[in-house]
Image: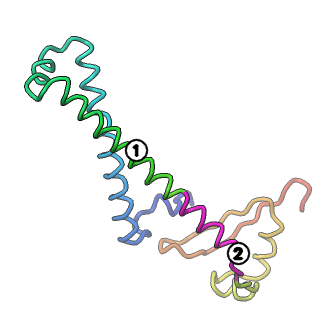
Amino acid sequence: MKNYIINVPQLQSLQKRLGSLCAWAICWIMWIYLLIPLVTLTSWMLGEKKLINQMRWFGGYKSLLELMQLYAFTLLVMIVLWFSWISIKLIRKSSKRTKTQQVVTDTELCEFYQVNADELNQCRNATLTTVFFNDQGHIIRLEPHLDKRGK
């Protein structure tokens, strides 16, 4: 069985699918927004004369400076938001480490995943374990692979 869960979108919830679609669209819009001035500048440097007329029409050099300030401010806001997001993630991660976690027994683990205790112990001792799923995403079989020494 070669179908991984990540490649089976029907197993993802609608909320996860919409969230990933929105994140994808926002990222592409941001890239396009940031790349349009570079394309314009490159074509102007290559001698596109229509762009010079457009610059004169929209205010010339002064409006270019105002746009550059707007772009710099936008980039600064994006950097601040990115660093604050990273900081929040680090704080959350460090606070999760300090919380005591509930210990799950082997019998509870076997009941939840519907796996035999013998299979679970074999998989723990194996160097590699293959997990097989059915179409609904439930575990149907575990296959432990032992190393060459038989451990």
Q: Main secondary structure of the magenta part?
A: helix
Q: Position of residue 71 (x, y in %)?
A: 31, 38
Asked whether residue 108 is drawn in magenta, I would say: no
* Mark 1 closeness class: few <14, some 14–19, many ≥20 residues within 10 Å: few
Q: Position of residue 77 (x, y in %)?
A: 38, 49
Q: How many marks?
A: 2
Q: Closer to the camera, 143 or 113?
A: 113
Q: Closer to the camera, 33 or 79?
A: 79
Q: Position of residue 25 (x, y in %)?
A: 31, 52
When the figure is inspected, residue 3 is found, relative to residue 80, above or below; the finding is below
When the figure is inspected, residue 107 is found, relative to residue 49, above or below; the finding is below
From the image, which quarter does the C terminus lie in? bottom right
**Three-letter residue code for mark 1:** Leu
Q: What label does residue 98 carry, if any?
A: 2
Q: Position of 64 compared to 72: left or right? A: left
The mark nearer the N terminus, 2 or 1, is 1
Label 1 residue SS: helix
Snapshot quadrant of residue 121? bottom right
When the figure is inspected, residue 105 is found, relative to residue 48, above or below; the finding is below
Snapshot quadrant of residue 11? bottom left
Label 2 residue SS: helix
Residue at image location 58% in from the left, 68% down from the top: 92
Q: Position of 5 compared to 46: left or right? A: right
Residue at image location 43% in from the left, 68% down from the top: 12
**Three-letter residue code for mark 2:** Thr
Extent of the magenta region: 87-101
From the image, which quarter does the N terminus lie in? bottom right
Snapshot quadrant of residue 94? bottom right
Q: What label does residue 76 carry, if any?
A: 1
Q: Position of residue 37 (x, y in %)?
A: 27, 30
Considering every residue shown, the one lying at the far front of the view is: 62
Q: Position of 47 compared to 143: left or right? A: left
